[in-house]
Amino acid sequence: MPYEFSRNIASLATLDAVQGLLCREVARHGYGSSAYRTVTPTETGTTSRFVFRTWPRAWARLSEQKGFATNSFAAAEARRRMTTFTWSDVRAQRSFSCAEETAWNDLRAFGWRNGFVTPVHGPHGYLATVSMASIEPDLDLSAPRRLHLQMISLMVHERCCALSGGIVVESACESLSARELECLRWVAAGKTDWEIGMILSISQATVKFHLDRARQKLGAKTRAQAVARLVLSGRYE
């Protein structure tokens, strides 16, 4: 029961103990492997780290070799979804890219039949996932079961954060200069480089320089993406 799980996890003092409790709980529901991963934004991109995982060694090696942690369909879905999902959900709801199709085929060839993922989104692009996998072809994926798995996954995330000192994500926006911020804000207002230059009394080339620097610091591919990250950071005003 969720209450019993919450009471037990609250008393745990190490990440290893959290891992053990999660493994025992998901095994009751047919999942033989589980993992907890965090993706933290940095000025140069993101840092992905498995806090723990109980995958078979052969699968862990294959996953690292092919970059499944960041390039699989499950990783992509975790970035775009706010709620839990199964591998079958993704397969049924959209077409796969060539790389995702390869990942799916590798999963099936290895023997995996079911997967369940709970994404947890945080400030400035932070992402954590609690995932579990099973070789069982038929599992109970009813709404009550999904809710239970989601609840224990969120408890695992909360306890791991508490044991590791919480989530501290430094925004790349903090590294923007006053001029870079100013230029980005005018872009958000719909101004062109020429118009921004006239407003700030600087050349169009200088505006472009500041905007390119801001985009690079924010790890954004486009100006629109850079503006979006600025807004999410709370530094738009």
Image: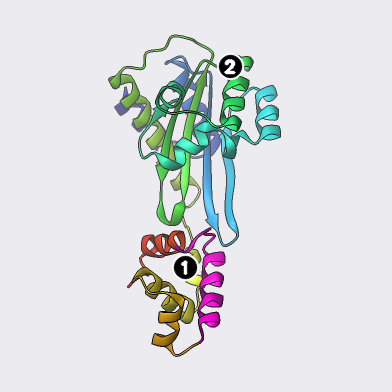
Q: Which mark is residue 173?
A: 1
Q: Is residue 41 visible?
A: yes
- Number of residues whose C-alpha sits closer than 10 Å to that of mark 2, classed few (under 14), some (14–19) or many (20 or more): few
In this picture, which residue range is highlighted in magenta?
Answer: 203-223
Is residue 128 in the magenta section? Answer: no
Magenta segment main secondary structure: helix
| Amino acid at circle 2 | Arg
**Alpha carbon distance from label 1 to label 2:** 42 Å
Q: State which quadrant residue 123 falls in.
A: bottom left
Q: Secondary structure at mark 1?
A: helix
Residue 54, by quadrant, is top right
Q: Is residue 166 visible?
A: no
Task: Choose the circle earlier in sequence order: 1 or 2.
Answer: 2
Residue in the picture at 63% in, 17% down: 110
Closest to the observer, 163 or 31: 31
Q: Position of residue 72 (x, y in %)?
A: 56, 33
Residue under numbered circle 2: 108
- For the point 70% across and 29% down, the residue is 61
Q: Position of residue 105 (x, y in %)?
A: 60, 20
Q: In the rendered structure, does residue 211 fall within the stretch colored magenta?
A: yes
Q: Which quadrant would the C terminus be assigned to in this image?
A: bottom left
Image-quadrant location for residue 201: bottom left
Q: Provide the secondary structure element on which disc 2 rests.
A: helix
Quadrant for the N terminus in the image: top left
Question: Where 96 sits versus 215, above or below?
Answer: above
Q: Look at label 1 and name its amino acid.
A: Cys
x and y, in percent, of residue 81 in the image: 39, 39
Q: Position of residue 129 (x, y in %)?
A: 47, 37
Q: Total number of numbered labels?
A: 2
Q: Is residue 213 left or right of residue 80?
A: right
How would you rate the neighbour count of disc 1 (Cα within 10 Å): few for under 14, some for 14-19, many for 20 or more? Answer: many
> Is 142 located above or below residue 82 in the figure?
above
